Every structure is written in C-alpha cells, then in structure tokens.
Image (cartoon, coloured by chain):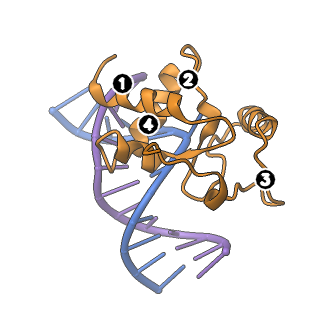
Chain colours: A orange, B blue, C purple
DNA sequence: AACATGACGGACA
DNA sequence: GTGTCCGCCATGT
C-alpha cells in the first residue's frame, strides 16, 4: 500500500455490506481526507480490478454510477441490481435508502 | 519542472 | 432540479 489513506479507503470499501452503497466523498472523509474523493477514484482504478473490492458499491454524491465507459456502467448496474439495489428511470439509486455509514 | 487528467464535490446562477 | 465553473490532489506525459 503506497499510503495509509489508500489502505483505509480499501478497508472501508471492503466493509460495505451487500445491498448498500457509499459515495466517493464520504469514503474519502472517513479515510481522513474530506477533499480526497479523486484519490478514492484513483484507488479503485489501481486496486479495483486486482483486489477483491466491491467497487460497484461506490457511487457519486447523486447516487448515480460515476464510471463513464458504457461497458463499465452496464457491468456495475448489473452487479448492484443483483444485490437488490433498484435504479429509477434515470439510472439513479435512492441514497437515502441504500447509503451505508461504517459506524454501525 | 510544467501541464493535463480523472469512476468527484461544492458553490452559484 | 439543471448546467457551469472551479477547487482538490495523486499520477501520467
């Protein structure tokens, strides 16, 4: 692990229960860097594939899938739906219902 | 060393 | 609620 921040980010993501999600910003804040959302993004780019991370449970602050590539988007949506998460007609998740707070 | 980039987020019109 | 602009910050060129 290049730094403690990344290590914590990965640990937090791994702790997200099935059927729940977290936003980039909240993960960054919980990892000790309130403005480090982009580093969370980078962590997923680097470790998402190799590590066994539930990267699909990480969405942006609007409850929308953040990935830009069409194939990646479809893959993430499919994984989340298989966990019981519903998307509205706009492809958005109801954060108030699925957001997870690592305090529990 | 300087500049561009990104699976973001917040402020503002 | 939507669109635009700007700040963040590690990485890549």
The residue that label 1 is drawn on is A7
Return the chain for callout 3: A
Residues flagged by tags 2 and 1 on a common chain: yes
Check disc 3 and report the residue beneath it.
A87
At which x and y percent is residue A14? Answer: 52, 28
In this rendering, the label closer to the viewer, 2 or 1: 1
Measured along the vertical axis of the image, is residue A53 above or below residue A95?
A: above
Foreground mark, 4 or 1, reads 1
Q: Are marks 3 and 1 on the same chain?
A: yes
Which comes sooner in the sequence, label 4 or label 1? 1
Q: Position of residue A102 (x, y in %)?
A: 46, 42
Crowd class of label 3 (few under 14; some 14 to 19; many from 20; radius 10 Å): some
Q: Secondary structure at mark 2?
A: loop
C-alpha span from label 3 to label 4: 23 Å
Q: Residue furthest front?
A: A104
CA gap, disc 2 and disc 4: 10 Å
Chain letter for mark 1 = A
Asked if the residues shown at circle 3 and circle 1 are in contact, with their CB atoms under 8 angstroms apart, the answer is no
Circles 2 and 4, Cβ within 8 Å, touching? The answer is no
Q: Position of residue A52 (x, y in %)?
A: 58, 17
Q: Which residue is mark 4?
A: A40
The quadrant in which residue C12 appears is: top left
Q: Is residue B12 above or below residue A102?
A: below
Q: CA distance from mark 4 to mark 1?
A: 10 Å
**Which SS class for mark 4?**
helix
Considering the numbered disc 3 on the image, is that residue within a helix, a strand or a loop?
A: loop
Residue A48 — which label? Answer: 2
């Amino acid at each position: 692990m290049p730094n403690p921040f990344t290590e914590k980010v990965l640990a937090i993501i791994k702790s997200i229960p099935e059927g729940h999600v977290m936003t980039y910003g909240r993960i960054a804040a919980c990892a000790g860097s309130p403005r480090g959302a982009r580093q969370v993004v980078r962590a997923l780019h680097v470790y998402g594939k190799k590590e066994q991370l539930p990267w699909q449970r990480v969405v942006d602050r609007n409850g929308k899938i953040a990935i830009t590539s069409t194939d990646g988007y479809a893959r993430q949506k499919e994984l989340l739906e298989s966990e019981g998460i519903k998307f509205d007609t706009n492809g958005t998740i109801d954060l108030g219902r699925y957001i997870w707070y690592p305090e529990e």
